[in-house]
Image (cartoon, rainbow, N blue to C red):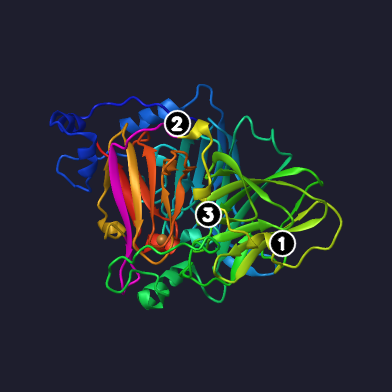
Amino acid sequence: MAPKGFPRPVTRRQFLALGAGATTAALIAGCSNTKSPSRTPVAPDSEIVRAAEDRRRVAGAARHVVSLQPRPTTVDLGGVQVQTWTFDGRVPGAEIRLRRGDVLQADLSNGLPQPSTIHWHGIALRNDMDGVPGLTQAAVAPQSNFRYEFTVPDSGTYWFHPHFGTQLDRGLYAPLIVEDPSDGRDYDVEAVLVLDDWLDGIAGRNPDRELDELRARGMKGMNMGGMSMSGMSMPPQRVDPHAPLGSDTGDVSYPYYLMNGRLGTDPVTLTARPRQRMRLRIINAASDTAFRVAVGGHQLSVTHTDGYPVQPAMAGCLLIGMGERYDALIDLSDGVFPLVAVAEGKNAQAFALIRTGAGDAPPANTRPVELNAIPLTAERLSAVEAVQLSRRTPDRVHDVVLGADANRYVWTINGKVYDEHLPLDVSQGERVRLRFVNKTMMFHPMHLHGHTFEVVNSAGTGPRKDTSIVLANQTVEVDFDADNPGQWLVHCHNLYHGEAGMMSVVSYVQ
Ligand SMILES: [Cu+2]
């Protein structure tokens, strides 16, 4: 779990910069989105990437083999039948569980009517297995196969999903749990909870049509979701800790919210014994919905976010953005308790039950008082010492300005949509800072592939994460060590924002 050391080759580019007498400050000031003629991107299938994988590979590592077939399926969400796309006929797809250091071999056989890929969200894996079509691999055509094979270097709660078009907003997602040898020492039972917003197959809707409709409506229907009309940024507003996401919490209206693929009318029931300690691994697989999660009659002791351990923090409820994960311990009472995930700002909720004893189940619309607490968000968390990054001045700083078009349904990074993106160049061995500057009126959960950054705070103790909520008109800074060479997507994990342009590339160059 400790930050990995890495030899730091002096590249010709660094040599020239240093030779010119540049100071660190000057390098930072000169941070660039250049497409200079001399830049040579590190290719995903290059020897440099293979060498990084070799360093991760443990001698005698166990191989974990799975096959995955995404395909059209009819599924029962709990009294509602829908035609959708799933991994192997179920929603969520079957959990993959392995141990830190194992090699995962996943044989994809594409049974969808579209090309597809799989992205292993949060894993610091070899670049050519990251599943981004057109960047790290060619999309896998219908009726074709692709073998993913990579070392899983860090324990924690992760997940996987396609990275092609709007497929994530179908039923194509599943947990990926990487166990640590110490897992299970401080709890008795474990439950994985996958949250989702659902529209596919309901009243003729599907996510491709949804994106078409958003584009047809433009930003006018967006409740001021985009920039201020002038295109200028608004002054930073005060954040209401009770409702940090503000009034605009999503672009899409969903008929259903699911916990582990089930509606509240026929919920998942987790069973345990009174006084047992339960570890919850909560994954937000939704496309356009943040959730506020609470367990009636219980406090959450938050222990991890995005797979990495934090100093335990008590909370009545927590707020989880799309792509984020939180692990929490609860000390179970005797009875039947609601586990509620309120769709933030959307007046609906996903629901499950925890049963440790006799009693009637609470109704699916029950609102535990714990939801009234200020929701825990990542800035309240501190990384445990073992996973804090070393103190180091960034070698390079990139602004990642989150913007929107005032009229069209277009979301941008540094003023560009993905097809026109300006790569964010980094060199292996550097400490890199990304400054997510949100100039829109909406929150964006920003995800970096292949790395776990540290959220910057003044004490140098910010949590390690791969997906960080950037509130409307706010700035979040994150640092990472450039120790995993390749071409890595950085993007908003609101699926519709990403598809409408809000994606760019952290590009290792030589
Ligand atoms: Cu966004």
Categorize mark 1 by other alpha carbons within 10 Å: few (<14), some (14-19), many (20+).
Answer: many
Please report whichever mark, 2 or 3, sits nearer to the chain's N-terminal start: 2
Please report whichever mark, 1 or 3, sits nearer to the chain's N-terminal start: 3
Indicate the quadrant of ligand 1 in the picture: bottom left
Instruction: Tell me which amino acid carries mark 1.
Output: Pro
Whether residue 162 sits left or right of residue 425 in the image: it is: right
What label does residue 70 carry, if any? 3
Q: CA distance from mark 2 to mark 3?
A: 35 Å
Residues rendered magenta in the picture: 389-412
Residue ID for mark 1: 267
Q: CA distance from mark 1 to mark 2?
A: 40 Å
Depth check, front residue: 428 or 47? 428
Residue 243 position in % (x across, y down): 53, 64
Q: Quadrant of residue 370?
A: bottom right
Categorize mark 3 by other alpha carbons within 10 Å: few (<14), some (14-19), many (20+).
Answer: many
Instruction: Tell me which amino acid carries mark 3.
Output: Pro
Residue drawn 47% across the image and 39% down it:
461
Residue 116 position in % (x across, y down): 44, 54
Nearer mark to the viewer, of 2 and 3: 2
Residue drawn 71% across the image and 39% down it:
187
Whether residue 81 sits left or right of residue 242 in the image: it is: right
Whether residue 287 sits left or right of residue 351 in the image: it is: left
Residue ID for mark 2: 3
Residue drawn 45% across the image and 28% down it:
56
